[in-house]
Amino acid sequence: MSEHITHTVVLDDCARLAPHSDKICDAFKLCLAKHHDIARLGSVTRSVDRFTVKLLRDARERWPTRKEGDLVAAKLAFVLGWRCHLAGDRQFKPIYRRHDPERYAGEEVKGAGDVSIYHDVVIFREVYDYGRKEPYVPSSLDYRLESHPAASAVSIGETQKLLRAMWQRSLLEIQSFLAADDDLEKWLEIFFARYEPFEVDLLRYAEFSHNPDPDKMRRFIIDDNFYDRTDPIIALARSIQRGAIDKTINLDRAVEAAATQSQYAQALRRGFHYLHAASDFFMGKIGEDELKKRSDLGKPHVPVKPST
C-alpha cells in the first residue's frame, strides 16, 4: 500500500472535524471517537468502492439493536475510514498520474511513486511532527531504525525480515480458506491471490525524508501547492490536534473555501463531504443512488490538467 501516511492523515483530520459539525450524525461521531484505531485501518485498505453501500446499509439496520461485542460500531468506524481513503485517492491519484504517467500506464501499480512518497514525508513533518505525534514514532522514517534505543542490540535487517514473515503469517492465519479447502491446487491458487507482498521500499522514504531532492520538492510540493498550513480547514484541524480549537474559524466556511486551496485542503473537503453523504444515508435522508453520486462511488480517477 502506497501513500500510507497521507491516507491516514485524511482520516485523522476528518475525525477531528466531524465532532464540530451538525452535518455528521452522532453515531459517526461515537464510532470515530471510540474506534479511531479501526477507522485508521480502514483508511489504508483497498477496494473501497466495492462494499461501502452494503456495509453502511447493514450498519444502519443493526445500529438500533447493537450490543456490546457485536462489532457493529467497530465495523462502521472501519467503513468511515474507508470513505476517507477514497477521498485521498480521488484527490491525489490524478496528481500521481500527471507526474508519473508511465508508471500508471499498466493495469496494476505496485509500490509507491516518488510524488506519493514526498506527500507522505511532508505530512509526516507538518502533521505528525517528524513522528513525535501518534500514531507514528520518530524512528518511523529512519534508514535502519537508528534513532531507536534498541537498534544497536539487534541486526535490523534480519529483524525486519523476521517481522515481515511473522506479519504475513498472521494475515494468512485469519483467512478461512486455510482450513476449509482440501483441494491443494485450489488452496495454492487462493493462497497466492491473497498473499500480500511488501512492495513499499522504506529506504526510499528515509532518503526522501532526510535528503529531499530540491527539484522534486519544488515540483511535487510547492508548484502543486500540496499543503498550506494557513488554509482555514487545515489550521482548524491543527488547532484541534493541539487541544485548543480555534473558534475564530467557521467549519462550514472553511470546508467550502478549501475547494480552491491547497491539494491537502481539497482532500479534507472531499473527505468531509463523503462523511456527510454517508451520514445522510445512515440517517435515512438520502437513498443509495444519491449516496453513490455524492460519494463518487465507482468513478474512475480522471487525470487533472497541468497547471499553467
Image (cartoon, rainbow, N blue to C red):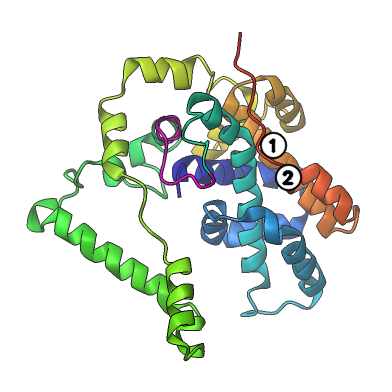
Residue beneath the point at 38% across and 73% down = 170
The residue type indicated by label 1 comes to Arg
Asked whether, in this view, residue 111 is left or right of residue 207, the answer is right
Give the image location of residue 98, x and y in percent.
55, 25
Q: Which quadrant holds the C terminus?
A: top right
Q: Which image quadrant for residue 232?
A: top right
Q: Is residue 103 visible?
A: yes
**Vertical relation: 250 (above or below) 17:** above
Secondary structure at badge 1 equals helix
* Contact check, label 1 and label 2, Cβ < 8 Å: yes
In this picture, which residue range is highlighted in magenta? 107-120
Location of mark 1 (residue) = 270
Q: Which image quadrant for residue 237?
A: top right
**Vertical relation: 176 (above or below) 10:** below
| Near-viewer residue (86 or 101) | 101
Label 2, residues with CA under 10 Å away: few <14, some 14-19, many ≥20: many
* Gap between marks 1 and 2 measured at Cα: 6 Å
Residue beneath the point at 67% across and 30% down = 247
Q: Does the magenta stretch include residue 220?
A: no
Label 1, residues with CA under 10 Å away: few <14, some 14-19, many ≥20: many
Asked whether, in this view, residue 83 is left or right of residue 139, the answer is right
Residue beneath the point at 56% across and 51% down = 43
Q: Does the magenta stretch include residue 119?
A: yes
The residue type indicated by label 2 comes to Tyr
Give the image location of residue 276, x and y in percent.
77, 46
Q: Can residue 15 be seen in this view?
A: no
Location of mark 2 (residue) = 274
Give the image location of residue 150, x and y in percent.
14, 55
